[in-house]
């Protein structure tokens, strides 16, 4: 899902639905009729130990995959601990007031505060309402690749690097997110289907930031959970800048059509968890009535618990998203808030 986001003083237009090309054919009636229940289990769960429901021997369990144990750059990864934060924009409240409300409800501060900036904006030297121990995550919109690879944007990039350097504390930089989608001007789909141009652009930014001494920046490469279009030139692998240029591997994924967390985040986890810490940079859930939203939050928390390379989660916590009727904030009902609070207070999210 690619909702519209606000920079501190201006609205940034975003495509209102993203990453759903493969799901667009799902009938509305089928979506409405489905209700996820966390107690649902496969048939094998009720069979005899060592055998499937049909009575055949179950193959031995595969060993757990290797996962990263260090990394993250200036914003360090702590094994077994996940930073929990949000893009937080609540109707009728300043960012500081919104932070105060969430602190009262959850008993804790955000550990990541997510903010959005346009390509030509002045990037922040400070952020209103940033808790003392929180890391900013600056999502900085991209531009066409040739505007970067030609050198025409070098001065703008250097200015951005100097401003983030002057922030004076570690932060996460998420440049040109969801580059594997066709909804942004910086996506490969809108740049001659040229993933090499994206990689060259990323590496040029990385080099200029290094030249400016912006060594407080952790680089977050953050595709969408699925690609649009699905093509060989638009895969994770073809768009990855390389381990030398990435500190965190991020991913956007929303429960819009009853996608389970494994559907949204499993593929990128399996691809990169042995090399880089994983940061879930955008996540939220549609409320289908009853406990559907609360149950999904609980399922998501269990998924993170079972995936130790996940070092951070940034929720999409807002009710100001223009042009979209779903209220994404965590307290749309008491059950959803309770599920989120339980997640926030768990040891897994004590990063």
Image (tube, rainbow, N blue to C red):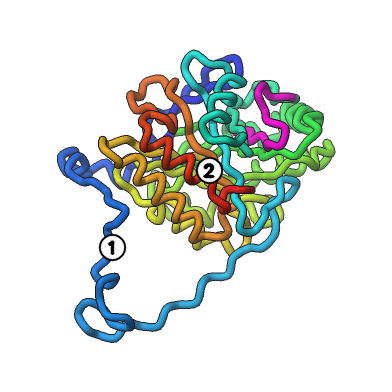
Magenta-drawn stretch contains 132:
yes
Residue 198, quarter of the rendered image: top right
Name the foreground residue: 42 vs 100.
100
How crowded pointer 2 is (Cα within 10 Å; few <14, some 14-19, many 20+) is rated as many
Residue 216, quarter of the rendered image: top right
At a point 50% along the width and 57% down the height, the residue shown is 305
Q: From the image, give the main secondary structure of the stretch colored magenta.
A: loop
* Residue that carries the numbered disc 1 in the rendered image: 41
Which of disc 2 and disc 1 is earlier in sequence?
1
Label ID, residue 17:
none
> x, y (%) of residue 289?
26, 35
Magenta-drawn stretch contains 195:
no
Q: Secondary structure at mark 1?
A: loop
* Residue that carries the numbered disc 2 in the rendered image: 344
At a point 22% along the width and 43% down the height, the residue shown is 25
Instruction: Tell me the magenta residue range.
Output: 126-139
């Amino acid at each position: 899902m690619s909702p519209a986001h606000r920079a501190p003083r201006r609205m940034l237009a975003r495509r209102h639905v993203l990453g759903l090309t493969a799901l667009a054919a799902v009938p509305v009636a089928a979506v409405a009729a489905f209700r996820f229940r966390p107690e649902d289990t496969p048939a094998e769960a009720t069979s005899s130990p060592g055998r499937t429901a049909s009575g055949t021997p179950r193959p031995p369990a595969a060993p757990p995959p290797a996962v990263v144990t260090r990394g993250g750059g200036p914003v360090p990864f702590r094994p077994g601990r996940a930073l929990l934060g949000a893009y937080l924009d609540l109707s009728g409240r300043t960012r500081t007031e919104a932070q105060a409300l969430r602190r009262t409800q959850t008993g804790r501060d955000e550990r990541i505060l997510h903010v959005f900036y346009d390509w030509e904006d002045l990037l922040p030297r400070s952020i209103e309402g940033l808790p003392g121990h929180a890391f900013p995550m600056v999502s900085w919109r991209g531009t066409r690749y040739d505007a970067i690879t030609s050198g025409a944007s070098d001065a703008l990039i250097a200015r951005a690097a100097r401003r983030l350097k002057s922030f004076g504390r570690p932060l996460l930089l998420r440049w040109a997110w969801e580059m594997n989608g066709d909804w942004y001007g910086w996506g490969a789909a809108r740049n001659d289907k040229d993933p090499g141009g994206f990689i060259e652009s990323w590496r040029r930014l990385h080099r200029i930031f290094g030249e400016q001494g912006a060594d407080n920046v952790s680089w977050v490469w953050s595709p969408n959970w699925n690609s649009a279009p699905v093509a060989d030139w638009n895969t994770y692998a073809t768009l990855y800048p390389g381990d030398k240029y990435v500190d965190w591997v991020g991913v956007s994924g929303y429960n819009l059509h009853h996608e389970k967390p494994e559907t949204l985040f499993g593929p990128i986890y399996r691809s990169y968890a042995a090399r880089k810490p994983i940061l879930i940079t955008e996540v939220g859930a549609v409320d289908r009535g009853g406990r559907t939203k609360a149950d999904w939050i609980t399922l998501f928390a269990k998924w993170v618990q079972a995936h130790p390379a996940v070092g951070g989660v940034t929720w999409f916590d807002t009710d100001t998203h223009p042009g979209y009727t779903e209220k994404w904030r965590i307290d749309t009902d008491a059950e959803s808030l309770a599920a989120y609070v339980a997640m926030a207070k768990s040891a897994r999210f004590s990063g």
